[in-house]
Image: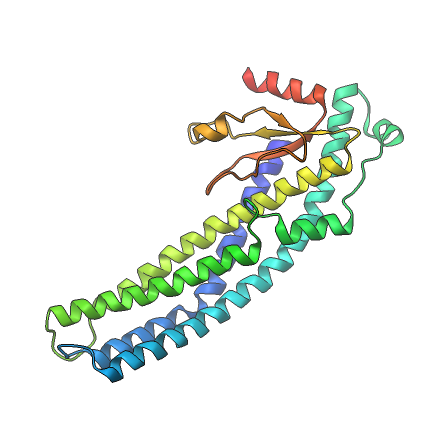
Amino acid sequence: MLARHVDDIQGVAATWGERLVDEYSSTQGNVALLAEEYVRFSSGRETLSYAAVRKRDKLRESIYELRSAGLNAVMAYLKERIAELVKAESQFGGKWLVAMYGLAYGLSEDEVNVRYEPKALTEPQMDSVRKYGTYNGNTVDGIFQKVFESDVDRIMSAIDHGMNANLAQEKKPGVYDGIIPLVNKAALTTSKQIMLNVSMVVNGISNNVSVEISKRNIEIAGTVMWITEMDERVCEDCDSLEGMTFTPDEVPACPMHPNCRCHLIPVTTEIADDITNRRKM
């Protein structure tokens, strides 16, 4: 049940990431055209004129506006999906508690619900996760604003690099033939950053829901267990936390680092011991 859920979460991250890359990259064609226009305007000079420098400043503003439109589309889509994810993760948390409690005490689902009915997250709890449950305390807005700013800087650096090469080689007037590949390479780096950050956001939200579920149901699952994928890709820091349990208020931030695939689950003491023993086999 848990393994399938973790796989589903990773699938969600991949699907969202691809969609966000498409949304953000929708401006790429116009960005490339602006870069080409600037290089054409500036080429054939020994040094950049005042007009060329002014045009470069305007170019940055135009690229900033284009990428802002892409960022706004990304955030509108992402925040809507996040609200759905938090709700779905809360529902899974309830099912997990019932399954875990039944396994610990040999009870059926109906018997568990008679004896103990898991409490769903409150709206304020879900709202808190939607705003802040991401990656080591960073908000969703903050994470993607950094990606956006580094993207614009990277594009302008690519254009400057192309212009410097053009001037150094004393090319004849015309478009520097390496500028578009440079700009597209910068965009490719941004696409990878988007995919990486979406994965961290999705994993972080899922894990934050687990922590909140534990807090909400402290009588049955007063601890949270750290589990890894238990393969050769697990880093030493994460591996050292495998199977460890924490109180909801003391659990380390998870994911711990970019590309972290670790997961947190609310557990009873009995289930924590059982899971640990099974994973050591």
Instruction: Give how far across and how far down residue 205 sits, in percent.
Output: 61, 46
Colour setting: rainbow
Residue 59 in the image: above or below residue 83: below
The answer to which quarter of the image holds residue 268 is top right
Camera-side residue of 209 and 2: 209
Quarter of the image that includes the C terminus: top right
Left of 133 or right of it: where is 44? left
The answer to which quarter of the image holds residue 66 is bottom left
Instruction: Give how far across and how far down residue 167 sits, in percent.
Output: 15, 72
Direction right: furthest residue: 114
Q: Residue at x 50, y 65 (%)?
A: 71
Camera-side residue of 22 and 151: 151
Left of 198 or right of it: where is 155? left
Q: Residue at x 72, y 33 (%)?
A: 96
Residue 245 in the image: above or below residue 139: above
Q: Residue at x 47, y 40 (%)?
A: 257
